[in-house]
Image (cartoon, rainbow, N blue to C red):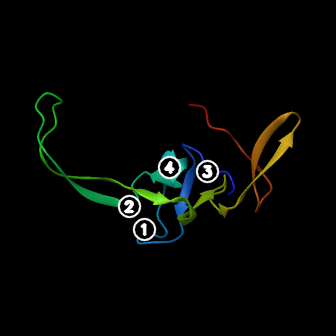
């Protein structure tokens, strides 16, 4: 099994499923289950009990659900879908876009 090449804060596009074509930022990567949480994608309704201590109102809340990593594709700097490769530049390992060959910049936290 290959390592996960998509990281937190990457911009991705959904390529399969009910949200096909939607784009969003990766909020969380769950490597053990090969799933990612993408902003505004795979919205589900969740019934929430009110909790006055945490200041939570009850009702039906809408939130993102995870999507399998095979159903998303990274967008490069130009906004095109691309596969990801890795190579060494000097002594550091960097990710690069397979379509354009350009290096994918690491985002600062």
Q: From mark 4 to mark 3, how far is it between C-alphas?
A: 11 Å
Disc 4 secondary structure class? strand
Place residue 42 in its image quadrant: bottom left
Q: Earlier in the sequence, mark 4 or mark 3?
A: 3
Residue 32: x, y in percent? 53, 49
Whether the residues at callouts 2 and 1 have beta carbons within 8 Å, the answer is yes
* Among numbered discs 4 and 2, the one appearing first in the sequence: 4
Residue shown at 33%/59% (left/top)? 43
Left or right: where 94 falls relative to 77: right
* Horizontal and vertical percent position of residue 54: 18, 30
Residue positioned 67% across, 38% down in the render:
106
Q: CA distance from mark 1 to mark 4?
A: 14 Å
Residue annotated with mark 4: 25
Which numbered marker is on residue 6?
3
Question: Which residue corresponds to mark 1?
Answer: 19
- Who is closer to the viewer here, 80 or 43? 43
Q: Position of residue 3 (x, y in %)?
A: 67, 51
Closer mark to the observer between disc 4 and disc 2: 2
Which callout, 1 or 4, points at the residue further toward the start of the chain?
Answer: 1
Q: Residue at x 50, y 53 (%)?
A: 33
Would you say 31 lies left or right of 45 here? Answer: right
Q: Residue at x 57, y 64 (%)?
A: 70
Query: Which is nearer the N-term, disc 2 or disc 1?
Result: 1
Q: Residues within 10 Å of mark 1 (few under 14, many from 20)?
A: some
Distance between mark 2 and mark 1 Cα atoms: 6 Å
- SS at mark 1 in the image: loop
Q: CA distance from mark 3 to mark 1?
A: 18 Å
Q: Is residue 64 above or below residue 109?
A: below
As drawn, 86 above or below 54:
below
Element type at marker 3?
loop
Instruction: Count residues near mark 3 (Cα–Cα under 10 Å), then give few for <14, some for 14-19, many for 20+.
Output: many
- Where 67 sits versus 88, above or below? below
């Amino acid at each position: 099994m290959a390592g996960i090449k998509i990281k937190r804060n990457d911009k991705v596009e959904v390529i399969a499923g009910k949200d096909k074509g939607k784009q969003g930022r990766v909020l969380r990567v769950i490597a053990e289950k090969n799933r990612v949480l993408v902003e505004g994608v795979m919205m589900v309704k969740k019934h929430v009990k009110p909790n006055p201590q945490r200041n939570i109102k009850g009702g039906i809340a809408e939130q993102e659900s995870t999507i399998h990593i095979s159903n998303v594709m990274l967008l490069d700097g130009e906004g095109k879908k691309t596969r990801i490769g890795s190579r060494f530049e000097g002594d550091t390992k960097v990710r690069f876009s397979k379509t354009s060959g350009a290096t994918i910049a690491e985002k600062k936290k």
